[in-house]
Image (cartoon, grey):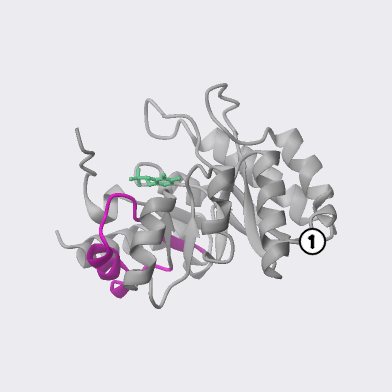
Amino acid sequence: MSIAENVAAIRARMDAAARAAGRDPAEILLCAATKMNDADRVKEAVAAGVDCCGENRVQELVLKQPLGAYEGRPVHFIGHLQTNKVNKVVGKVALIQSVDRQELLEAVNKAALRLGLVQDILLEVNIGEEPQKGGFTPEQTLALAARMGAWPGLRLRGLMAIPPISEKKGDNCKYFAKMRNLYIDIAGKKYDNVSMVCLSMGMSDDFEDAIAEGSTMIRVGTAIFGARHYPA
Ligand SMILES: *Cc1c(COP(=O)(O)O)cnc(C)c1O
C-alpha cells in the first residue's frame, strides 16, 4: 500500500471511530509521526492530507525542514528534547508536544523570550506513572497549568501522553479516560497563558480507543509509513 492509500485508510477508520463515539470527525487531527522517514516520504504524507507532522529528533527536524518536507502543514516536535538543543526547536515548530520536565519548560520559555515569541506547548503526562518514563504526574500537570502565567514565553495548548505498552486491545482505555478528565479539568479553569485545544493521544495500534476516549489528535507513524527500519 502507498502512503496515500494508508492515509486514506486511517482517515476512514478515524471517521468511523469518531462517529461510533458520537463525535464530529472534523474535531480529530492526524499527525504523521515522521521519524526515520526522509523528506520525500514526508512530502508524500503531506500531499495525502495529514494535518501536521511530528518529528522526534532534532537532527531529523533540522535536516528535513530546509528541504521543505513539511511545506503546507505545521510541524510539531514530539520526542525527547535535550535542553541544550532547545534553540534549534523553539520558533521552528508550531507546537512542542513533549514538554516533559520543568527544566525543559524553563529552557523553552527562556529561548522563546530571547526570540520575542510565544511558543505553543503541550505538557507530556506520564499517565501510566511508569518510573522509567518522562512526563509529569497528573498532580504536577494540574499545578503547572495553574502557574503558566509565570512563563510569558509559553502558551499551554493541551496535553500529550504515551500510555504503557499494552498487552491487548482496549488496555489503554483507562489511561486515555484519565487524560480526558485531566484535560477537561484544566480547560474548565481560567489560567493565564492557557488555551486548551489539543489532547494528543493514540498511535497506530490504539488510535480508535483514544478517539473513543476524547483524543483530538492522533500521532501515527507505522500505519502511514510502514515498519521503521532502525540501523543495526
Ligand atoms: C513514533 C511515535 C508515534 C507513532 O508511533 P506508531 O506506533 O508508529 O504509530 C507517536 N508518538 C510518538 C511520540 C512517537 O515517537
- Residue 65, given in percent of the width and then of the height, sits at 38, 67
Q: Is mark 1 within 8 Å of ligand 1?
A: no
- Whereabouts is ligand 1, in terms of quadrant? top left
Asked where in the image residue 87 lies, by quadrant, the reply is bottom right
The residue shown at (40%, 58%) is 61
Residue sitting at x 21%, y 49% = 226
The residues colored magenta run 28-51
Looking at the rendering, in which quadrant would you find the C terminus?
top left
- 33 falls in the magenta region: yes
- Viewer-proximal residue among 226 and 24: 226
Number of dots carrying numbers: 1
Q: Is 24 on the left or on the right of 2, as rendered?
A: right
Residue 193 lies, with reference to residue 230, above or below; the image says below
The answer to whether 105 appears left or right of 166 in the picture is right
For mark 1, does the 10 Å Cα neighbourhood hold few (<14), some (14 to 19), or many (20 or more) residues? Answer: some
Residue at point 76%, 48% (across, down): 185
Report if residue 32 is visible in the image: no
- Does residue 177 belong to the magenta stretch? no
Q: Quadrant of residue 50?
A: bottom left
Where is residue 105 drawn, in percent x and y?
Answer: 68, 47
Q: Amino acid at mark 1?
A: Pro
Residue 7 appears left or right of 116: left
Q: Which element is circle 1 on? A: loop
Q: Answer above or below: position of 89 versus 228.
A: below
Identify the residue position indicated by label 1 in the image.
152
Q: Quadrant of residue 149?
A: bottom right
| 178 relative position to 224: left or right | right
**Which sits in the foreground, 55 or 140?**
55
